[in-house]
Image: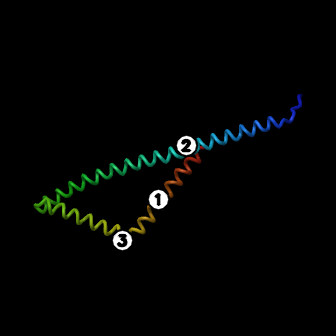
Amino acid sequence: MEEQKFSFQGVLQKIKEYIDNTKELTILRIVGSVSDIISSVITDGLFIIFSFFVLLFLSISLGFYFGDLFDSNALGFLTLGGIYILLILILTIFKKGIEKNLINLSIRKFFKKWNESDDSK
């Protein structure tokens, strides 16, 4: 059996390899987290854009429907505008509660993604 000699050069080499590997692992984890966040932002953004168009076209349809009911497109769209003003007032009244719920939802979503990325490692 051969005796292995202690070598500072070998220890320094192993430390350097460890630091390089840790640096690469950290970079890969950061890239993974950033790509998760970017994909989430893109899909959420697309969802918001498509939801906007759905709401827009439904609003136009509802305006024309009210116009048929009142025999005047102007009154139909005015009624729809009044409904939206009422919704804005309701949102203004309940703004604090809505903000609190949205903050809690975003924190839960962030930590869910965080925990999923930790579980996959």
Q: CA distance from mark 1 to mark 3?
A: 20 Å
> Which three-letter amino acid code belongs to the residue tagged 1?
Leu
Residue 60 image offset from top left, x and y in percent: 21, 54
Q: Dot 2: within a 10 Å radius of its alpha carbon, few (fewer than 14), some, or many (20 or more) residues?
A: few
Picture residue at 53% right of the left edge, 54% below the top: 111
Q: CA distance from mark 1 to mark 2?
A: 24 Å
Left or right of residue 46, residue 67 in this image: left
Q: Which mark is residue 93?
A: 3
Is label 1 in a helix, a strand or a loop? helix
Is label 2 in a helix, a strand or a loop? helix
Q: Which mark is residue 31?
A: 2
Q: Nearer the viewer, mark 1 or mark 3?
A: 3
Q: Nearer the viewer, mark 1 or mark 2?
A: 2
Vertical side of 2 occupied by 84: above or below? below
Circles 1 and 2, Cβ within 8 Å, touching? The answer is no
Q: CA distance from mark 3 to mark 2?
A: 41 Å
Left or right of residue 76, residue 89 in this image: right
- Residue 83 is drawn in which quadrant? bottom left
Vertical side of 99 occupied by 112: above or below? above
Name the residue beneath numbered marker 1: 105
> Which three-letter amino acid code belongs to the residue tagged 3?
Ile
Q: Earlier in the sequence, mark 1 or mark 3?
A: 3
Residue 89 image offset from top left, x and y in percent: 31, 69
Circles 3 and 2, Cβ within 8 Å, touching? The answer is no
Task: Please tell me which residue lies in front, 119 or 44.
Answer: 44
Is label 3 in a helix, a strand or a loop? helix
Q: Earlier in the sequence, mark 3 or mark 2?
A: 2
Please, which residue is most extreme toward the bottom here? 93
Left or right of residue 3, residue 97 in this image: left
Picture residue at 68% right of the left edge, 39% below the top: 20
Residue 94 image offset from top left, x and y in percent: 38, 69
> Which three-letter amino acid code belongs to the residue tagged 2?
Val
